[in-house]
Image (spheres, rainbow, N blue to C red):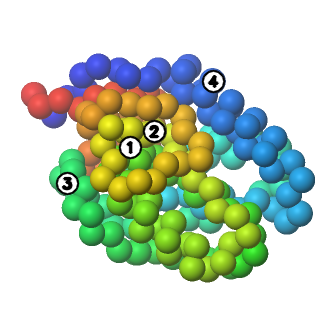
Amino acid sequence: MKIGDILITPEQIETRVKALAAEISRDYQTVEQPLIFVGMLKGAFIFMADLVRHITVPTQMDFLILSSYGDATKSSGVVRMLYDLQVDIVNRDVILVEDIVDTGLTLHYISRELELRSPKTLKICSLLSKDECRKIDIEPDYVGFSVPDRFVVGYGLDYAQQYRNLPYIGVLEED
Ligand code: IMP
């Protein structure tokens, strides 16, 4: 495997992440209790770290781990919770932070699971979206970039646990 086209540069990511943080901060200006950011590990760890540093309203943070694709590049649709939240989200404003929405199956599973815990509000912020790949009708409230139906890595996103450290989003290609 090797990295082919660079779809999104570090500079583009930085600009967009700051804009998303400004939009979220505006939307939650009047929040009564700290806004809870829930990062989906491991893919969202870099995005979440950059995003929250530009948020200007009071925040709390927590993380979730769901089972992943393994080493495959397509979603099996079977998702399991491997590590659960430590905070109670009842009656709280929550933003779920994802790396990428592809079929939407993962997001559907986790948003249904979190809704059962009765948050005051639940919104989804995803760095990337493969708009044309949805198998289920679900859209994030905040999206960084729409990307084509290609397997992308970098800025937290992996293939077989590699490439997460790349500072850009690139397309993974066969050698
Ligand atoms: P979905 O359930 O098909 O929407 O897939 C969502 C999850 O699959 C993401 O959180 C990623 O972990 C992973 N994923 C989907 N597409 C890609 C990709 O192009 N690169 C890396 N991971 C991906």
| C-alpha separation, residue under disc 2 versus residue under disc 4 | 14 Å
Whether residue 170 appears in this view of the structure is: yes
Pointer 1 residue: 157
Label 2: state its secondary structure: strand
Q: Is residue 157 left or right of residue 17?
A: left
* Viewport quadrant of the C terminus: top left
Circles 2, 3 touching at the beta carbon (< 8 Å)? no
Dot 2 amino acid type: Leu
Of labels 3 and 1, earlier in sequence is: 3
* Mark 2 and mark 3: Cα distance apart in space: 20 Å
Q: Amino acid at mark 1?
A: Leu
From mark 2 to mark 1, how far is it between C-alphas? Answer: 10 Å
- Pointer 2 with pointer 1, Cβ within 8 A: yes
Q: Which residue is mark 2?
A: 128
- Density class for disc 3 (Cα within 10 Å; few <14, some 14-19, many ≥20) is few
Q: Looking at the image, is 94 positioned above or below residue 168?
A: below
Q: Which mark is residue 67?
A: none
Pointer 2 local density, CA inside 10 Å: few below 14, some 14–19, many at least 20: many
From the image, tell me which residue sits under label 4.
15
SS for callout 4: helix
Depth check, front residue: 57 or 102: 102
* Farthest left residue in view: 175
Residue 71 vs residue 134, the one in the foreground:
134
Q: Please state the horizontal and vertical placement of residue 27, each as a whole percent of the image.
A: 78, 45
Q: Earlier in the sequence, mark 2 or mark 4?
A: 4
Secondary structure found at label 3: loop
Looking at the picture, which amino acid does disc 3 mark? Asp
**Label 3: which residue?**
71
